[in-house]
């Protein structure tokens, strides 16, 4: 199969798999146990991986908290920071995000805003109409421009006396739009609020230095950079006293500095560390290759009247292509099903299957929501893969 859905997940690198296997077979100790060698070896492997992930992000090791993935990291950061701020820091309880975020951010903020209780259902009262509830927090959802970019001016306009946090995606998972995270961080800090970056599609693909960017929190997942699923990290900026206080999302044991309870998945953490190490080692080479394959895709559809990339190159990260197929009877779902035995592509986020893309609507292209295909590339994608996919489109 030709795999062009890498924004959903990437294949596991062979080096990553080989690094993980010993921690599923011989070195299966619990790193929270004491005294014996299998526990010591597991603990050492976790800390080695932590250092590698920190290096990828330009962070310090103690600033990395391992989680089950970027969704958990985002929940931990937004819920935990707002909860602590509300009850221990003067009642500040307001978060600002955009209407083009990943569902992990949107639904956290909708939950805090009293709009939903699960990821499928609005908040309801039995035998009555949908009704919001007051959870003691509030969220604002600011708009993006036609290229999916958040402006610092709109962030500034949304700030009020209760605002304590802003949260924005670095590279949009559906359209590839790249936000000016450093500029947004500067605006946030000028007004005394913190900033969280969802770097799920950026980590390991473009250089990141959290301290240089000036961000306070970050979320990332291993499976977007050729690592295993089920493991991610939350970056939490330290101050002179160490990690700042934040309400834990999972309560239980004292793992991960007391912020994230639960037995660590050592094999996955090792895999994340190895993937981060490879990403640092090969970033320039991989970036050059993916840029070239992306350019080849763009050249290959140039002159085909009914095919158009909806986000200009200067606003998007190479490797994520949101393609409009502007034909009267074209339907993206039907087309993807038709070619599913040979090619893997998507209509958008894997976390929004079965509903129209809110991102496409947010950029003002809602009328074309059923005509857009997301093509996302990896370091193994070939020109032949691109040629074959385009041949299906042009038939």
Image (spheres, rainbow, N blue to C red):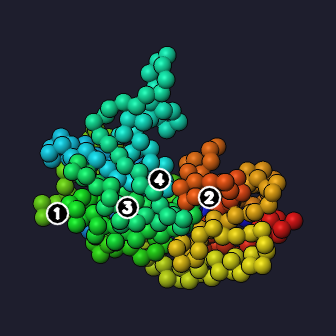
Q: Where is residue 319 drawn, in percent x and y?
A: 59, 71
For disc 2, the marked residue is 365
Q: Residue furthest left?
A: 241
Task: Give me the residue at 58% from left, 54% from top.
Answer: 361
Instruction: Say which label, 3 or 2, has the lower sequence index.
Output: 3
Q: Is residue 36 above or below residue 186?
A: above
Closer to us: mark 2 or mark 1?
2
Task: Give me the residue at 24% from left, 65% from top.
Answer: 189
Closer to us: mark 4 or mark 2?
2
The answer to whether 182 appears left or right of 34 in the picture is right
* Secondary structure category for the residue under label 4: loop
Give residue 384's quadrant in the image. bottom right
Dot label at residue 161: none
Q: Residue furthest top?
A: 127
The answer to whether 100 appears left or right of 133 in the picture is right
**Do labels 3 and 2 touch, CB within 8 Å?**
no
Could you tell me how far apart the alpha carbons at marks 3 and 2 are, in whole angstroms? Answer: 20 Å
Give residue 393's quadrant in the image. bottom right
The answer to whether 289 appears left or right of 191 in the picture is right
From the image, which quarter does the C terminus lie in?
bottom right
How crowded pointer 2 is (Cα within 10 Å; few <14, some 14-19, many 20+) is rated as some
Q: Is residue 118 above or below residue 261?
A: above
Task: Give me the residue at 57% from left, 64% from top.
Answer: 175
Does residue 371 appear in the picture of this structure?
yes
For disc 3, the marked residue is 154
**Do labels 2 and 1 touch, CB within 8 Å?**
no
For disc 4, the marked residue is 99
């Amino acid at each position: 199969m030709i795999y062009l859905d890498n924004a959903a997940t990437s294949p596991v690198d062979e080096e990553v798999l080989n690094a993980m296997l010993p921690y599923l077979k011989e070195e299966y100790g619990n790193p929270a146990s004491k005294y014996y060698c299998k526990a010591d070896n597991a603990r050492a492997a976790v800390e080695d991986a932590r250092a590698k992930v920190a290096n990828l992000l330009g962070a310090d090791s103690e600033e990395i908290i391992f989680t089950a993935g970027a969704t958990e990291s985002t929940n931990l950061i937004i819920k935990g920071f707002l909860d602590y701020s509300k009850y221990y820091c003067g009642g500040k309880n307001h978060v600002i995000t955009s209407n083009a975020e990943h569902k992990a951010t949107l639904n956290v903020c909708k939950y805090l805003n009293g709009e939903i209780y699960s990821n499928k259902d609005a908040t309801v009262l039995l035998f009555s109409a949908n009704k919001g509830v007051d959870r003691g927090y509030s969220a604002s959802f600011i708009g993006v421009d036609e290229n999916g970019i958040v402006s610092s001016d709109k962030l500034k306009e949304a700030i009020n006396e209760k605002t304590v946090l802003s949260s924005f995606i670095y590279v949009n998972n559906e359209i590839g739009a790249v936000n000016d995270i450093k500029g947004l961080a500067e605006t946030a800090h000028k007004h005394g609020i913190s900033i969280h970056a969802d770097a799920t599609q950026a980590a390991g693909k473009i250089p990141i230095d959290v301290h240089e960017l000036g961000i306070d929190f970050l979320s990332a997942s291993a499976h977007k950079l050729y690592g295993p699923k089920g493991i991610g990290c939350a970056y939490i900026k330290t101050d002179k006293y160490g990690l700042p206080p934040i309400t834990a999302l999972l309560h239980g044991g004292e793992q991960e500095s007391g912020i994230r309870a639960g037995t660590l998945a050592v094999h996955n953490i090792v895999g994340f560390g190895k993937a981060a190490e490879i990403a640092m080692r090969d970033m320039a080479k991989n970036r050059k290759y993916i840029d070239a394959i992306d350019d080849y895709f763009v050249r290959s559809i140039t002159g085909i009247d009914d095919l158009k990339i909806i986000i200009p190159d200067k606003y998007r990260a190479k490797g994520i292509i949101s393609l409009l197929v502007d034909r009267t009877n074209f339907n993206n779902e039907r087309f993807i099903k038709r070619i599913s035995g040979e090619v893997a592509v998507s209509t958008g986020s894997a976390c929004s299957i079965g509903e129209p893309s809110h991102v496409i609507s947010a950029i003002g292209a809602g009328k074309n929501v059923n005509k857009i295909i997301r093509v996302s590339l990896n370091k193994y994608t070939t020109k032949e893969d691109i040629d074959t996919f385009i041949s299906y489109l042009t038939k």
